Image: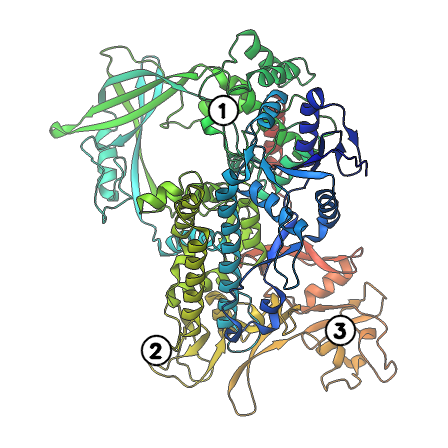
């Protein structure tokens, strides 16, 4: 233990790398440290570290609510105090720190966790856990004084200066109170909200998990609201007139516009109006006919313009760009950045919301650029050398500003050169390094030309056409990005901003060579991608109307850079969202949750104002303007209100925007409508009680979307579908069937496809010899036949000669709503694959897709094969990748 009689100070950092930085900074002034398994130690200091959060809060056992007891009878859960629960994967690290904290020769503790609310919480929970509990289970104080190391920069000098100016425990108490309050409030709202909504949705039986959270649910609301806008959108036709003009130096394109157009204002203003759009095809054709072949006069104005490089990356902007450029998910980008930081040590700490560097960081920046300039990285070294040779690295406020640095500074390279990076790691590393170098380069310079061509027509009518050119004069920082940036300028289409223009002499008359009418349609709002959703989460505060709350959220948004990826992944894991390419699409479960929260009157859980209100009050706690006790009383009251509203809801159905299905009721032919819980017959006029036919919207905990219910009503069969859960919570796959019972009442049921194993009489032997064989079993060579709703090997069912099945080959006659005809199964057995079939419907996205069924010998089952991508597109993509690598 190396304990001595001299009192020592235990320094607890948040991460091992920071602990090592502290040791290196203290060694010149405090002496050499001995390295142990979990800490460093000398005569004055013991330095150790957590690895992020080591503990989580939990209700005392008496207040814990098990899943099987998720009923309103046990809600709300508002315990008098919170116990701490070690995280399983870091128990060893926690025990090592606790052992050090309890050492008799440790006289004081220094909190060296990250400078901010979360860093404060990590340390305070460790300190509390080290103190233990009394006989009643309540925490006891550790009883050792605490001081705070507040670091904004990790240079050795900055660390030593921070040790000379340690903050007192009293100074840090308000921040600690705010940190604990935020953590406990999130627990109370998340646990009670989730269990109240789950209890409400499980009233009719089963277990329908419905999670909510202060950040998760408003984030989901953003995606659902966008999807609602898309569904309400109705495309409108409009027309544009494009002309080609012949000048002495060549031809150029222009687009008609109305010079008298003004952007409409007001709440009911039509957002689709544009000066170049015509809403009457006849008018557009008349303009084209009038200008074709006519002379025209030209005026133009050229202005210089500059474009500065973007700021250094914080985590959110890095995740957004990596998603837009490479399709990386936010989770993937964070994992890559973390590996580049921890494993390869080539990037600084990635979980940051700052895009600037400390004012004293000019020296390390220059050292990093020198390392890059001297490296063997041909796509980066020349640019780093150019920045140094031209003395462009200067302490500007745009990049070196303590006021813009929060818990951490921007993500930059460390100066240690990479080795053995994966392809994805190399892409992300290059992204960060290019931005790091480019920010020191001058702004790119353009010449922007706006040309107006006036065509005089019969009757004194004059039509105006606009052409805009943007020519790159000096690439500046864009040179660091090579061809990628140049393509953004040179690759524009005719009539767009971006193409260089052929010159026109002053006073020259040009001729309208051609005029064409192009029919277009308005487009709905784009679905969120991870890049755009991260941006929306970051800027959520801008949509808050209350000025104080908006200011409180100004630098916060929904979640933090470190948690936003986990929030999105959580929504995907809970099946609230699905990925469709790069788009994020809300599921029926997401729409049902929004309907429920709106209908119950607890919409505060869907709005970013809740985060704004909390941030405002937490800031008051940090300024000692509000007590922790008062804040937690408000949270408890809000929790009780949410549970009460769910518990006391007494209407037949939650109000909402529900679908009317086109398929008729199978029992009486009446109109079937959706309500919160069911699809139900409403009689021939759609307004009555109907014949009594209905089926639940969430059989087995899987919500049926209106289009799925429509298909089920028409075909009386749907699936096989995934995503069902048994009463024990186990997932299963099955088909849904609608069929009449013995009394003629149509009922919904599951078909597990087990007819082939049990036989039509529930387990009796089957005479398969009388059934026509389709081909040899790919597993054992015996004949395969059609039996019930499956194709099965004759040795896979009980027969008089073979009571016990000896093979397990079987394949459904309908797969993902695509019927598999006997001749297709015969082809699969004969050739190893079916024809290309176009009727498959994805369980995940509900979109149709084309594939063929193949026998996968390695997996021992039937699988999918998809058509290869167009070779031209493949070659084009490969060429693009090659150009980027060359750049």
**Location of mark 1 (residue):** 487
**Location of mark 2 (residue):** 686
Residue 354 lies, with reference to residue 634, above or below; the image says: above
Q: Position of residue 551 (x, y in %)?
A: 36, 40
Q: Quadrant of residue 825?
A: bottom right
Residue 360 lies, with reference to residue 811, above or below; the image says: above
Q: Is residue 459 left or right of residue 558?
A: left
Task: Specify few, some or many for label 3: CA neighbours under 10 Å numbering under 14, 14-19, or 20 or more.
Answer: many
Q: Residue furthest front?
A: 5
Q: Position of residue 682 (x, y in %)?
A: 38, 80
**Location of mark 3 (residue):** 785
Which numbered mark, 3 or 2, is in the foreground of this view?
A: 2
Between the residue at mark 3 and the residue at mark 2, the CA separation in whole angstroms equals 45 Å
| Front position in the image: 669 or 304 | 304
| Front position in the image: 600 or 513 | 600
Q: Is residue 11 left or right of residue 487?
A: right
Q: Earlier in the sequence, mark 3 or mark 2?
A: 2
Q: Earlier in the sequence, mark 1 or mark 2?
A: 1
Task: Specify few, some or many for label 1: CA neighbours under 10 Å numbering under 14, 14-19, or 20 or more.
Answer: few
Q: Residue furthest bottom?
A: 743
Q: Can residue 405 be seen in this snapshot?
A: yes
Quadrant in which the C terminus appears: top right
| Front position in the image: 307 or 600 | 600
In contact (CB < 8 Å): disc 1 and disc 2: no
């Amino acid at each position: 233990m190396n304990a001595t009689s001299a009192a020592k100070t235990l320094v607890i950092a948040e991460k091992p790398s920071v602990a090592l930085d502290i040791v290196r900074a203290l060694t010149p002034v405090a002496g050499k440290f001995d390295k142990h398994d979990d800490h460093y130690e000398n005569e004055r200091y013991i330095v150790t570290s957590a690895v992020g959060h080591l503990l989580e809060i939990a209700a005392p056992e008496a207040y814990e609510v098990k899943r099987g007891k998720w009923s309103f009878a046990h809600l709300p859960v508002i315990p008098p105090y919170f116990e701490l629960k070690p995280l399983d994967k870091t128990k060893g690290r926690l025990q090592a720190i606790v052992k050090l904290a309890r050492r008799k020769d440790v006289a004081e503790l220094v909190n060296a966790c990250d400078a901010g609310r979360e860093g404060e919480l990590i340390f305070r929970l460790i300190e509390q856990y080290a103190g233990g509990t009394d006989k009643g289970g309540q925490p006891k104080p550790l009883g050792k004084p605490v001081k705070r190391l507040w670091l904004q920069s990790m240079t050795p000098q900055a660390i030593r200066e921070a040790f000379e100016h340690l903050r007192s425990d009293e100074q840090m108490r308000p921040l600690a109170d705010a940190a604990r309050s935020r953590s406990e409030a999130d627990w109370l709202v998340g646990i009670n909200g989730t269990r109240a909504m789950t209890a409400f949705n499980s009233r009719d039986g089963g277990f329908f998990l419905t999670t909510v959270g202060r950040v998760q649910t408003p984030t989901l609301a953003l995606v659902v609201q966008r999807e609602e806008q898309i569904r309400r959108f109705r495309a409108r036709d409009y027309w544009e007139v494009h002309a080609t003009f012949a000048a002495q130096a060549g031809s150029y394109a222009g687009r008609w516009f109305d010079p008298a157009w003004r952007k409409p204002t007001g709440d009911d203003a039509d957002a689709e109006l544009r000066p170049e759009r015509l809403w009457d095809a006849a008018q557009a054709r008349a303009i084209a006919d009038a200008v074709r072949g006519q002379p025209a006069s030209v005026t133009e104005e050229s202005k210089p313009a500059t474009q500065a490089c973007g700021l250094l990356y914080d985590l959110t902007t890095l995740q957004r760009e990596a998603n837009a450029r490479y399709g990386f998910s936010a989770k993937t980008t964070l994992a890559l950045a973390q590996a580049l930081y921890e494993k390869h040590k080539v990037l600084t700490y990635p979980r940051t919301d700052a895009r600037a560097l400390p004012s004293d960081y000019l020296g390390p920046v220059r050292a990093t650029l020198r390392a890059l300039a001297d490296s063997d990285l041909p796509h980066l070294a020349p640019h780093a050398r150019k920045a140094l040779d031209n003395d462009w690295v200067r302490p500007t406020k745009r990049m070196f500003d303590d006021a813009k640095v929060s818990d951490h500074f921007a993500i930059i390279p460390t100066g240690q050169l990479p080795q053995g990076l994966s392809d994805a790691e190399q892409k992300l590393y290059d992204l960060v390094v290019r931005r790091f170098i480019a920010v020191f380069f001058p702004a790119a310079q353009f010449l922007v030309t706006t040309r107006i061509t006036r065509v005089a027509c019969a009757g004194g009518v004059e039509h105006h056409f606009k052409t805009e050119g943007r020519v790159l004069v000096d690439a500046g920082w864009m040179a660091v990005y090579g061809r990628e940036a140049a393509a953004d300028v040179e690759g524009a289409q005719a009539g767009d901003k971006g193409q260089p223009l052929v010159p026109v002499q002053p006073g020259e008359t040009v001729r309208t060579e051609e005029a064409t009418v192009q029919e277009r349609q308005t487009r709905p709002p784009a679905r969120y991608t991870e890049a755009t959703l991260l941006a929306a989460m970051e800027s959520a505060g801008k949509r808050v109307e209350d000025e104080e709350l908006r200011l409180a959220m100004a630098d916060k948004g929904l979640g933090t850079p470190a948690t936003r990826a986990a929030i999105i992944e959580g929504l995907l894991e809970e099946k609230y969202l699905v990925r469709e390419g790069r788009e994020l699409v809300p599921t029926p479960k997401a729409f049902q949750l929004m309907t429920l929260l709106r209908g119950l009157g607890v919409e505060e859980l869907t709005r970013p104002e809740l985060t704004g209100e909390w941030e405002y009050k937490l800031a008051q706690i940090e300024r000692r303007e509000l007590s922790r006790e008062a804040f937690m009383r408000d949270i408890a009251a809000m929790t009780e209100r949410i549970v009460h509203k769910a518990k006391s809801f007494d209407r037949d159905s939650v109000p909402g925007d529900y679908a009317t299905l086109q398929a008729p009721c199978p029992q009486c032919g009446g109109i079937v409508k959706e309500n919160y819980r069911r699809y139900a017959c409403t009689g021939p006029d759609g307004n009555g009680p109907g014949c009594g036919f209905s089926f639940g919207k969430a059989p087995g905990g899987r919500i049926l979307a209106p289009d799925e219910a429509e298909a089920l009503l028409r075909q009386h069969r749907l699936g096989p579908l995934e995503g069902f859960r048994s009463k024990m919570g186990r997932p299963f796959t099955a088909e849904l069937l609608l069929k009449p019972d013995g009394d003629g009442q149509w009922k919904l049921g599951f078909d597990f496809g087990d007819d082939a194993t049990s036989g039509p009489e529930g387990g009796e032997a089957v005479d398969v010899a009388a059934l026509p064989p389709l081909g040899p079993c790919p597993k054992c060579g015996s004949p395969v036949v059609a039996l019930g709703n499956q194709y099965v090997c004759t040795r896979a069912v009980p027969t008089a000669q073979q009571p016990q099945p000896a093979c397990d080959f079987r394949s459904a006659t309908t797969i993902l709503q695509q019927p598999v005809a006997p001749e297709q199964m015969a082809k699969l057995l004969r050739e190893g694959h079916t024809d290309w079939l176009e009727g498959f419907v994805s369980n995940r996205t509900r979109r149709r897709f084309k594939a063929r069924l193949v026998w996968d010998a390695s997996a021992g089952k039937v699988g999918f094969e998809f058509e290869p991508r167009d070779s031209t597109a493949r070659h084009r993509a490969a060429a693009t990748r090659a150009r980027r690598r060359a750049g």
